Image (tube, rainbow, N blue to C red):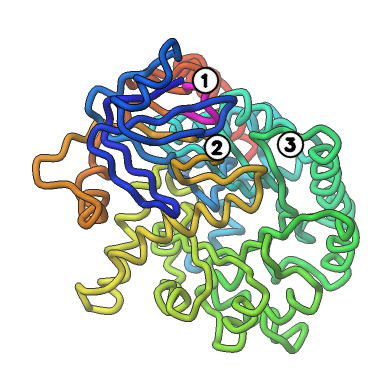
Amino acid sequence: MLIHNGRVITLGQSRQLLDDGAVLIEDGLIVEVGSSADLLARHPGVPTLDARGMTVMPGLINVHHHLYSTFACGLACEPAANFVEILEKLWWKLDRALSLEDVRYSALIPVLRCIKSGCTTIVDHHASPNALRGSLRTIAEATSGAGLRSCLCYELTDRNGPEETQAGIAENAEFLRELQRNPNPLVSGLFGLHASMTLSAETLEAAFASVADLDTGFHVHVAEDRADQEDSLRKYGKRVLQRFHDHGLLGPKSLAIHCIHVDAAERELLLATDTSVVHNPQSNMNNAVGCADALGMLAQGIRVGLGTDGMTSNMFDEVRVANLIHRHVQQDPRVAFVDVIDMLTKNNAAIASRFFDHPVGALEPGCYADIAIVDYRPFTPFHAGNYYGHFMFGLANAKVDTTIVQGRVLMKGGELQTLDEAEIFARAAELSPGTWQRF
């Protein structure tokens, strides 16, 4: 397929902006980017997609999502006074209430919202203790069936007893080994862990041993609240990241989520092990746990990406909030702007590309053809030098017209091509009352 007649933003290493650009796709990969006139002349007969003057850019990436949280919308629960109570009164009750069919439809709704907002890759962290076995396969079928790219894991925890702990280890390890036996270019995996405060030393050892022979990493919440650090210091005499490092859990494919209450020594561990951090500003504000020093970590050389923690599936929303919260916290209007867009476009691409066979997050030869076409026609000068301003205050407010993953059109003209939105919402509406009753 040849996408033409668009304003092409490549990102990646080239970081080009082509006013009348074209992108040639072959076998799910980008093979050439150039002017519309040139590519159309040299590739006659190739099926075309006319971008109609809209902005053609890499699909967005979310490096920390919780698809299972979907059915919490509108759910009333006992008020929580702190973060631990939020877990106990809401999330740990909801995840126990999910059936395997709930898991499927909890995934499908945010998946279609990702597609509608131009997000083409997600890294998800799942929990459903009473529908544990086969839950990752169920989510993988939902994401890949819709055409979305995903990296999945199950949240290992000790909080529901030893049988569930063993089942959580098995679900992660078996899913990773199944992907090794039967690779799917749209699906990859990590080993999921809840947080230090719900994981014993024995469980961490067993988790590491179960996948020690695999090229994988660990996806874990780190010091989201002070309670996590206090628990680790009280039980083990060490801080959370030191504890994880001692168990071999940090590394280039591992994701340390939140990292709000980490100290200088822990930041040095992140840097030394090439472990990526994921910042989730909307969720952190909602849970009143504080704001991570994401800008300081970036300045230190730590790779910091941007996620939503299940609060939204729209990465344009998240990057705007990230810009605002850091300016608010530092009381300085000069900070964050470039950094948070880099988190989303550069760092999320670098993080997610570690989990798939070809790079994502750029329109360059050899990258997966994951593309968003946004109905944005600039009304002020638009060039490579002011792209960030247009991204934050123009593109982020525009409607996504077309979403493509690995060369497959998932949405065109604002119409979903791979999912029946009405059917999905209707079935979810039938399922969720039962879920709430179990809750």
For residue 298, above or below residue 59 = below
Residue 290 shown left or right of residue 225 in the figure? left
Q: Name the residue at 71% across, 82% down.
A: 242
Give me the C-alpha separation between circle 3 and circle 1. 18 Å
Q: Amino acid at mark 3?
A: Ser
Magenta stretch encompasses residue 229: no
Q: Name the residue at 46% across, 60% down.
A: 280
Dot 3 lies on which element? helix
Give me the C-alpha separation between circle 2 and circle 3. 27 Å
Q: Name the residue at 69% across, 42% down.
A: 188
Residue 94 shown left or right of residue 417 in the figure? right
For residue 98, above or below residue 207 = above
Q: Residues within 10 Å of mark 1 (few under 14, many from 20)?
A: some
Label 2: which residue? 368
Residue 147 shows in this picture: yes
Precedes in sequence: disc 3 or disc 1: 3
Residue 328, x across and y down, in percent: 26, 72
Quadrant of image for the C terminus: top right
Dot 1 lies on which element? helix
Q: Name the residue at 61% across, 45% down.
A: 94
Residue 145, x across and y down, in percent: 62, 23
Numbered disc in front, either 2 or 1 = 2
Which of the two residues, 385 or 432, is positioned nearer the viewer here?
Answer: 385
Residue 19, x across and y down, in percent: 23, 37
Residue 20 shown left or right of residue 112 in the figure? left
Give me the C-alpha separation between circle 2 and circle 1. 28 Å
The furthest residue to the front: 42
Label 1: which residue? 424
In magenta, the rendered stretch is 404-409
